[in-house]
Image (cartoon, grey):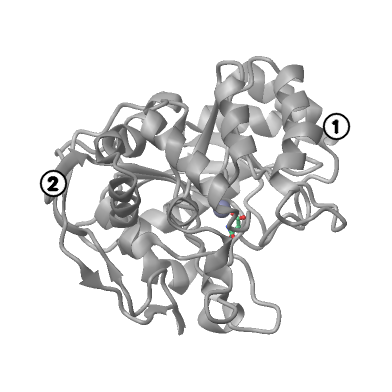
Amino acid sequence: MTAITIRRPDDLHLHLRDGQAMRSILPFTAARFARALIMPNLRPAVTTTEQALAYRKRILEALPQGMTLEPLMTLYLTDRTDPAEVDRAKASGCIVGLKLYPAGATTHSDAGVTDIRKVDAALSRMEEKDLVLQVHGEVTDPAVDVFEREARFIDEVLAKLAARFPRLRIVFEHITTRAAAQFVQDSRPGIAATLTPQHLLMNRNALFAGGIRPHHFCLPVLKSQADREALLAVVASGDPRFFLGTDSAPHARGAKEAACGCAGIFSAHGAIELYAEAFEAAGTLQTLEAFASEHGADFYRLPRNDGRITLVKEPWEVPRSYPFGAEEIVPLRAGETIGWRLADVADGGSRPEGVSR
Ligand code: NCD
Ligand code: ZN
C-alpha cells in the first residue's frame, strides 16, 4: 500500500507547554489532529478549572490563522484537590478529566499526589460526575528498578484503585510493558490505555545506540523488545481499549543534552506518520484508523471527527532541529527519515464553536 486515507485523528496525550514555546510547536499538532488532550504539567501546574480555561484560551489564541485544534483539558490532581473543583471542571464542559502524577514520577510532577489515599474524595466525585482519570503509572520509590516501575505501579496502586472505584473511568497513559497491556486487556470495563509512537518504534537499545542518546529518553523509559512486541500485538488486535496519545513532550536542546537531561521526546512534527510507519512494519496498517481516530473518541464519548487525512508512503528527511521559542528543539528522527508523509487534510467542515480562529 502506498497511500492511506483515514478519519481525522485525535492526540489524546500531548504536552504543549506555554507562551512562545507553545506557539512554535502547536501548528505541528493542529496540522494533523482535530483534537488533543492537553497535559496540565505547566509550572505552576494547571490545578483549577479557572487555570485550565485560561490555558485553553491561550492555546486557541496561539493557533495561526486558518488552523484549528480543539483542546481537551485535564486538571492536575494534587493532594489538595477539592471535590468542588471536580464539580467545576465538569460544569465547564471543556475539561474531560484529571491527571494523576505520582509526586516525583516525571517532568514537573513535584506537585503531584504523594499518597493515593489523599485523593479518595476527589476520585469518588470524579466517579460520580464521570470525569476520566488519566494516570502516569509508575511508582516513584528510587529503590525500584526504573524498568520495573510501571509493572510495580499496577500491583501496588492501579489494580486496587480500579477495584475501589469500580465505575471510575481510567486511562493508563503511555503504557510501555507487556504487564500493562495485559492489565488493560484483563480489566473491568472503563479501563483503557494510550500508546506513544516511540514505544511502538523503539526498545531500550535506542537509548544507548553508539553512545548515550538523550533525545530517546522519556518517561516511562523505553522498555525491552519483548515489551515492545506486546504493545504491537495489542494494536494489531484492534482492541478498542487502546488508542493514540503521542506524549510529545518538547524540551529545549540544552535541557536534554545535559549532565542530567530531562525526560521527554518531541514527536508532534511527524506523529501520525510515525505511527503509520510502526503499524506498517508490524503488518497492521488496517488497524491504524480505529486506533488513531475512533477508539479514543469513543472512550471519551466524543463524536468521531468528520475530516480525513491522507498519508503517502514517501520518505522525508526530518530537520536536525526546529525553533522552540528563543531556543531549539531536536525532534524524533532528527536528520533521519520518516517513511510516511502527510499529503492531504480535509477537515470535514464543522468545528465546535470557539475552536477555530
Ligand atoms: C513529560 C514532560 O516532559 O512533560 N515527559 C516525558 O518523558 N513523557 C512528562 C510525562 O508525561 O511523563
Ligand atoms: Zn506525558
Q: Is residue 174 visible?
A: no
Residue 34 in the image: x percent, y percent?
Answer: 29, 44
**SS of the residue under disc 1:** helix
Image marks 2 and 1: residues in contact by CB distance under 8 Å: no
Q: Amino acid at mark 2?
A: Met
The residue sitting at 54% across, 27% down in the picture is 91
Q: Amino acid at mark 1?
A: Arg
**As rendered, which of 273 and 299 lies closer to the eye?**
273
Which residue position holds label 1? 117
The residue sitting at 46% across, 72% down in the picture is 21
Q: Nearer the viewer, mark 2 or mark 1?
A: 2
Give the numbered dot on residue 356.
Answer: none
Q: Is residue 260 visible?
A: yes
Q: Is residue 269 left or right of residue 199?
A: left
Whichever of labels 2 and 1 marks the residue nearer the N terminus, that label is 2
Residue 57 in the image: x percent, y percent?
Answer: 43, 52
Q: Is residue 103 left or right of residue 326?
A: right
> Is the residue 88 above or below the residue 35 in the image?
above
Mark 1 burial class by Cα count in 10 Å: few <14, some 14-19, many 20+:
few
> Is the residue 355 above or below the residue 327 in the image?
above
**As rendered, which of 314 and 173 lies closer to the eye?**
314
Give the numbered dot on residue 1.
Answer: 2
Mark 2 burial class by Cα count in 10 Å: few <14, some 14-19, many 20+:
few
Identify the residue at the far front of this view: 226
Residue 256 in the image: x percent, y percent?
Answer: 58, 77
Q: CA distance from mark 2 to mark 1?
A: 51 Å
**SS of the residue under disc 2:** loop
The answer to which quarter of the image holds residue 65 is bottom left
The residue sitting at 43% across, 56% down in the picture is 201
**As rendered, which of 179 and 47 lies closer to the eye?**
179
Q: Is residue 81 left or right of residue 12?
A: right
